[in-house]
Image (cartoon, rainbow, N blue to C red):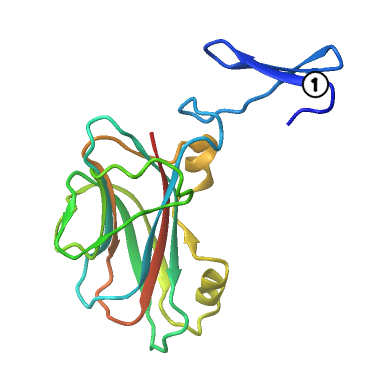
Amino acid sequence: MTQAGGSATATGGDVIATHTINSKEHEVILPADISGHILGTKPLFGVNIPSQVHVAVANTVHWDLFNADAALIVRVLSIRQIPNITTAVTGVVFDWLLERTTAAGTGGSSLTPFELDTANTDLDADITARSKPTGGATQSTDLFNYSISSEETNAATIQLASQGGLELVPPAWADNGHGIVLRQNQGLRCVQVTSSAAGNTGWVITFTME
């Protein structure tokens, strides 16, 4: 946006911008993320995983996200795990595990990512997500373990749910738009380590494609 009597121009491979106001030239700062894109210019996508029941089977995979494209890069900027506090259960403390994967999930239910701006480029078909895959989603690197109580009356659980869930991508990982990078044939999965059917959990995943 320019003021009256002003103009703006941008030149050069690094996009050096200037803003002229009443014959005086000023530099314009264009902050960029780690991939070199000006902040806010990459398309954002989301995956909504509605609250789904826990499973009385240890090491159950609740969802996976996978990038099978040969050229595109996926950067996962946010994963929010949202405990269900509206379903009455006799809850227990669940251990969870976020892991990298080397194969796309199979079976289960396919999830359709959505665009946060419907004018953006459609998501590439080689980037997929599934709820409770029954196969594939092959384990690679463990990123970290954590625990959440499924008891809906638990104060900590209520706090997590009321603030939109537990963020699984630490700020240090997401700074400057870095996120968890998924290159060709790389993915993520979330594993319910504890064997119990007590409770329900949902997730919201946000990522970019470049």
Is 158 situated left or right of 195 in this image?
Answer: right
Residue 68, position as x, y percentages in the image: 21, 40
Q: Which residue is mark 1?
A: 6
Q: Is residue 111 above or below residue 157?
A: above
Quarter holding the C terminus is: top left
Q: Is residue 6 left or right of residue 29?
A: right
Residue 67 or 150: which is nearer the viewer? 67
Q: In the image, is residue 182 above or below residue 107?
A: above
Please say if 4 is above or below 57. above
Task: Give the mark count.
Answer: 1
Which image quarter holds the N terminus?
Answer: top right
- Residue shown at 63% from the left, 25% from the top: 30
Instruction: Tell me where residue 146 sits by quadrant.
Output: bottom left
User: Looking at the image, which residue is at 42% across and 70% down?
Assistant: 148
Residue 118 image point, x, y percent: 45, 49
Q: Residue at x 70, y 22 (%)?
A: 28
- Disc 1 crowd, CA 10 A, few/some/many (<14, 14-19, 20+): some
What's the amino acid at mark 1? Answer: Gly
From the top left corner, tell me how far across and down residue 177 is, in percent.
50, 37
Quarter location, residue 81: bottom left
- Tell me residue 167's x, y (percent): 48, 57
Vertical side of 164 occupied by 114: above or below: above
Answer with left or right where residue 140 lies relative to residue 91. left
Residue found at the very far front of the displayed protein: 5
* Label 1 secondary element: strand
